[in-house]
Image (cartoon, rainbow, N blue to C red):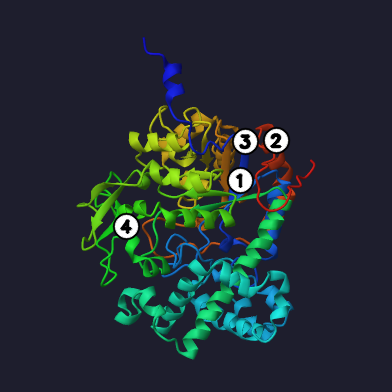
Amino acid sequence: MWDSEEFMSERPAPLFPWLQERAAGILLHPTALPGPFGIGNLGEPAHRFIDFLADAHTRYWQICPLGPTGYGDSPYQCFSAFAGNAYLIDLTPLLERHLLTEDEVAPLRALPKGYVDFGRLYELFWPILRRAFQRYLQARDVLADYGDFDQFRAAHHHWLHPYALFSALKQHFGGLAWQSWPAEWRSYRAALNRPLSTELAEAVHAQQFYQFLFFAQWRKLREHAASRGVGIIGDLPIFVALDSADTWSAPEIFQLDQHTGKPLQVAGVPPDYFSPLGQLWGNPLYDWQVLRSRHFDWWVDRFRANFELYDIVRLDHFRGFEAYWSIDARATDARLGFWENGPGLALFKAVHQKIPHARIIAEDLGLITEPVVELREATGLPGMAVLQFAFGSGSDNFYLPHNVHPNSVIYSGTHDNDTSLGWYESAGPIIQDEFRRYLRSSGKAPNWDLIHAAYKSVCRLAITPLQDILGLGSEARFNTPGTSIGNWQWRFEMHQLDHARDTLGSYLRELADNSGRQAPQPHLTHQPMNFPIS
């Protein structure tokens, strides 16, 4: 007779069984924070947001990727998998230390407060930051609390120099993708053998300085978060941008033509009910055979870099590590792609060997096959459940609260969804009726219905976008997948957070405490945690 206990005992223990305690978090990308310079940054409003989380017994702040964004402004299409977004640098300390003047930052102060005007920001921000760099070279001691610049450059040289040189050359060649640069500059190795002009050398140095500022300010923010018992959940996209320092400096680990740098195969997803042509993302695919022969060194370095920034990492498009949809780079849609095997468990074993206590969330949304489930269970990573996907298909819907698994992270919605209020208003009468009957709700406050359902679910981690806490509609949607205009721009203003603190702070504390999500998380990486006493 088959003995289930004996069978289970023979299965290897999962690699990363880290999610054992109940907690809650809020999803908000830092660009959406209030601030005086046209975009949210790592300054005082970010510190106040962390205080709001701590006072509400909300233990995690989840963000989107922090990398430098390119055309389209998406944090999921960055110029580097390792660098930080200089737009997030708070200019206030640079003003206080006379690296900038009020007259110089005045144009940034005139930018809109309720959304990010990325076009104007691009025109205004970089010349201002360049002036700060030039003055810093004459007065380096004014940023002594940020650390030693030269030591920073040496410690991060493996990614910092390629990124800085890539950025300087990209500016020099008028913003063209590196595949369109002159042949002698079309690879990092070739560029290293060429003398740089004084102008290019200074531009490289400036880019390194911007990263120095970013990482110093991020370190201070992390220290404040740790002191308040708040952890940061970061986001690691599976793919990198085709036009990036990553592909330029290490083309051998991607499926690229080694002469032109152009992709041979690109990423996407196959056709489905919602998209008859599939989705053609266009990201270059990895050469997993090369990476395997190198013990996945680039990926281990990438995970290590992320865990220097975050306490937990959400791994985007987890199913792509089991199998990914490969599309000919010349194709105009995704219909003629095919499935290729990903690295599977071997990659995660390599990560476990170097980072055994890594805390990773698997983004496993969409149509997930049994092999993907097996890979997730073998890794031990918690998957995701989104409550906006739970209604309209009956009681066996995987995302309904009675079907979810404790080793999961449950969301009312994500950065790719409409706000919960906007979603409900556009859901249609059938879904609205099922929603009201299942949650025993009047439908008058659907955002709070989903927040309550998430907090009370068996999932050990519950995440809510700030827009749902604030009760905002579709005007506050952050991203609409498949569109290229109007995304990533939303911002809130400080008076909204102050109002939420004054009117909802005690309610959120009570909700966390009553649902068992008030327990401290003793794994933050900077300072001993100091949890507020209720």
Q: Secondary structure at mark 3?
A: loop
Of badges 3 and 1, the one in the foreground is 3
Q: Residues within 10 Å of mark 1 (few under 14, many from 20)?
A: many
Q: Position of residue 388 (x, y in %)?
A: 47, 41
CA distance separating discs 2 and 3:
10 Å
**Above/below status of 223 relative to 371:** below
Query: Which mark is on residue 25?
Result: 1
Q: Where, quadrant-wise, is the N terminus in this rendering?
A: top left
The residue that appears at 34% across and 36% down in the rendered structure is 371
Q: Earlier in the sequence, mark 2 or mark 4?
A: 4
Q: Which residue is mark 3?
A: 22
Circles 1 and 2 in contact, beta carbons < 8 Å: no
Q: Earlier in the sequence, mark 1 or mark 2?
A: 1
Q: Secondary structure at mark 4?
A: loop
Query: Which mark is on residue 285?
Result: 4
Of badges 2 and 3, the one in the foreground is 3
Kindly tell me whether residue 473 is visible in this rendering: no
Kindly tell me whether residue 5 is visible in this rendering: yes
Q: Which residue is mark 2?
A: 513
The residue that appears at 27% across and 68% down in the rendered structure is 258
Q: Quadrant of residue 105?
A: bottom right
CA distance separating discs 3 and 1:
11 Å
CA distance separating discs 1 and 2:
13 Å
**Above/below status of 397 relative to 219:** above
CA distance separating discs 3 and 4:
36 Å
**Above/below status of 432 relative to 50:** above
- Amino acid identity at mark 2: Asp
Q: Earlier in the sequence, mark 2 or mark 3?
A: 3
- Amino acid identity at mark 3: Arg
Q: Position of residue 261 (x, y in %)?
A: 29, 70
Q: Residues within 10 Å of mark 2 (few under 14, many from 20)?
A: some
